[in-house]
Amino acid sequence: MIDAPAGTAWYVYGVGEDDEALSRIEGVELIRQGGLTAVVREVSLDEYDETILPQRLNDRDWLERNARAHEDVLQAAAAVTAIVPLRFGAIYRSREQVGRMLDERSGEFVAALERVRGHVELGVKVWTDLPTLEGTLAADAEPSAGGEGAAYLQRRREEQKRSRELAARCAELAEETHARLSALAAAAVANRPQPPELTGRRDRMLLNGAYLVRAGDDGLRREVERLAAEHAELGLEYEVTGPWPPHNFTDEAQ
Amino acid sequence: MSTRDLAQSQRGPAPAQLADVLERILDKGIVIAGDIQINLLDIELLTIRLRLLVASADKAREMGIDWWEGDPFLSKGGRDGNGTSIDSRLRALEEKAGLPTKHEEDEDS
């Protein structure tokens, strides 16, 4: 189907139930079909056409603006009702096509809405200052017998051993934290920690977890505080983000 | 986490980090192939960084805690399976130091 260049399309942010509360969200339209509601915005094909979008996506400011707008709409929706977030870039050429999509994937949306209803997603990141953490590992240097060369070699071996111990300790701390937080969540996922190039921090991210918890339940936050207190000597920093719309919990797998 | 950060997170969300938003918006959520096909992997902006994030969808590592892999600081000693290079480096050092190498010791015994 070829539209005129100045045509429009419908960008879908997420799918909820037929809840009147959704109509209070500013700047969006609703497309209702079979008990489900798509939260959409009419967008210009000048910006969102297949031939133009790849360039837009590579414009940092454009991407940030639109990613944040996507998130803002989902935040507003999640604040008033259950909502299933869609990944960025679900764009249809007509309202009818959106309705058809709702019909076709109705089962998936209903199941996902059931899972996330009454819940929010919290993010928990654990950071470590590696030198501080390394300093807390048991010191086990044995005095070296023998000459300078032997001492050097022993130092090298100890360094290697400490590297392995440090990596193991990091994994252990991440696993412990994730296990304790998962126990308080309806669902949990440990995402790949963000690399330093992305975070811009010297500290290393040990854990990048997302947890689906009941809205208003602050048990997970309290557990994070307890963990922070227990690990105060280890140079760890705990960061809670959210509440987020349940981006991480729309798949059945979780 | 410092007490200040905790207090802040309890007061309500501070503006989210762009990385956190992108991680969720571009890599999570239900995937719908709309009428307009876009390939998010084509995003050149933050290219490598985003691909690292997008790669998380592979669930290559259940726990996602393999960040020290390839880290020059943590992996300089080598991890399991990387023994050969350590051995050879050690041997070179041992030879330089005029010490009997492990290799020679094995031959002697």
Image (cartoon, coloured by chain):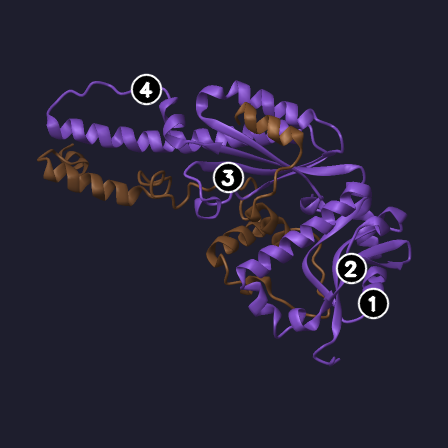
Sequence order check, earlier mark of 4 and 1:
1
Q: Position of residue B104 (x, y in %)?
A: 14, 37
Amino acid carrying mark 1 in the image = Arg
**What distance separates the C-alpha of mark 1 from that of mark 3?**
43 Å
Is there one chain holding both mark 2 and mark 1? Answer: yes
The residue that appears at 72% across and 61% down in the rendered structure is: B32
- Comparing marks 3 and 2, which lies closer to the viewer? 2
Sequence order check, earlier mark of 2 and 4:
2
Task: Report crowding for label 4: few under 14, some 14 to 19, many 20 or more residues within 10 A (C-alpha).
Answer: few
Check disc 2 and report the residue beneath it: A40
**What distance separates the C-alpha of mark 4 from that of mark 3?**
25 Å
Q: Chain of mark 3?
A: B
**What distance separates the C-alpha of mark 4 from that of mark 1?**
67 Å
Amino acid carrying mark 2 in the image = Val
The residue that appears at 54% across and 53% down in the rendered structure is: B55
**Residue B65 image label:** 3
In this orientation, which residue lies closer to the viewer: B29 or A201?
A: A201
Check disc 4 and report the residue beneath it: A139
**What distance separates the C-alpha of mark 2 from that of mark 1?**
9 Å
